[in-house]
């Protein structure tokens, strides 16, 4: 099973999200080996969830608050997303970490909130260009994994990790597939220090239809988290077809 997750970020308004969701569902072919999840904006989440209900396409939240209810203006909790039918949630995306200042402790609390609501968390990790220039990419990854997984009660829940090197996200400079594979092996080794649960690891960072097969061909890369290329139905369909073939 290959996992293709589409992070629509803040590229689409509600109408555009509905059109993309409807087109994706209407043109979906039988791909038994593909698990597809889309992550629309909060304002479009209800509409897209209704469109995808009963189809092979699942829907997730781009971000969640770590408390179910309360005086948290502007926030939307894992519980609220669960109520509208979302089954996945991105947690700790690099843009949340480096633009909005989310810390490892925040990522941990949001992961726990998702597990409590039976939402599958997709924990995003990755090093910055400065980390890599200083030879600290493994240090950064290890620290991010430890802060989330140490003592985490996963139980029978599913959980994903997405490796997103910050220097490759939205830059058009993807990580070399061989280097991505090396990092995925390291990530799996680190996660195994904390849990026996098999955690699928996705690659994210300037994925497109031209380079996706380089990642999909690795037995250590379990799928892709696609950003801007996922909001263009022609490009995203090419990605799915390339992986499915």
Image (cartoon, rainbow, N blue to C red):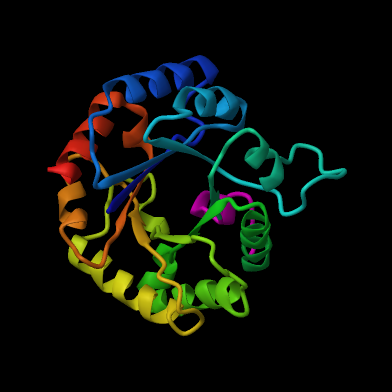
State the image coordinates of residue 22 (x, y, percent, origin top left): 40, 19
State the image coordinates of residue 238 (x, y, percent, origin top left): 19, 33
The residue under the point 53% across, 71% down is 144
- Tell me where the magenta segment starts and ends, as one range: 92-103
Q: Quadrant of the C terminus?
A: top left
In the picture, measured across the screen, residue 7 lies left or right of residue 237, that is right
Q: Does the stretch in magenta take in 97? A: yes
State the image coordinates of residue 51 (x, y, percent, origin top left): 47, 22
Question: Is 231 located above or below residue 90 in the figure?
Answer: above
Nearer to us in this view, 241 or 166: 241
Q: In the rendered image, which quarter is residue 218 located in?
A: bottom left
Q: Quadrant of the N terminus?
A: bottom left
The residue under the point 42% across, 16% down is 19
Question: Is any part of residue 53 visible from this angle?
Answer: yes
Question: Is 189 located above or below residue 69 in the figure?
Answer: below
The residue under the point 55% across, 22% down is 47
The residue under the point 30% across, 25% down is 233
Q: Does the stretch in magenta take in 189? A: no
């Amino acid at each position: 099973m290959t996992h293709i997750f589409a992070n629509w970020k803040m590229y689409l308004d509600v109408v555009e999200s509905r059109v993309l969701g409807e087109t994706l569902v209407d043109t979906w072919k039988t791909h038994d080996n593909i698990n597809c999840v889309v992550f629309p904006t909060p304002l479009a989440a209800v509409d897209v969830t209704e469109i995808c209900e009963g189809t092979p396409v699942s829907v997730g939240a781009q971000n969640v608050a770590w408390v179910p209810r309360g005086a948290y203006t502007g926030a939307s909790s894992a519980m609220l997303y669960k109520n509208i039918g979302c089954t996945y949630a991105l947690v700790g995306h690099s843009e949340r970490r480096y633009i909005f200042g989310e810390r490892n402790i925040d990522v941990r609390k949001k992961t726990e909130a998702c597990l409590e609501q039976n939402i599958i968390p997709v924990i995003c990790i990755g090093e910055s260009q400065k980390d890599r220039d200083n030879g600290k990419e493994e240090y950064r990854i290890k620290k991010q994994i430890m802060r989330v997984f140490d003592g985490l009660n996963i139980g029978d829940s599913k959980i994903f990790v997405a490796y997103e090197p910050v220097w490759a996200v939205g830059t058009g400079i993807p990580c070399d597939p061989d280097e991505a594979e090396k990092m995925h092996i390291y990530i799996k080794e680190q996660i195994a220090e904390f849990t026996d649960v098999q955690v699928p690891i996705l690659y994210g960072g300037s994925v497109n239809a031209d380079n996706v097969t380089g990642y999909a061909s690795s037995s250590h890369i379990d799928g892709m988290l696609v950003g801007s290329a996922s909001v263009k139905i022609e490009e995203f369909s090419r990605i799915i077809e390339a992986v499915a073939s």
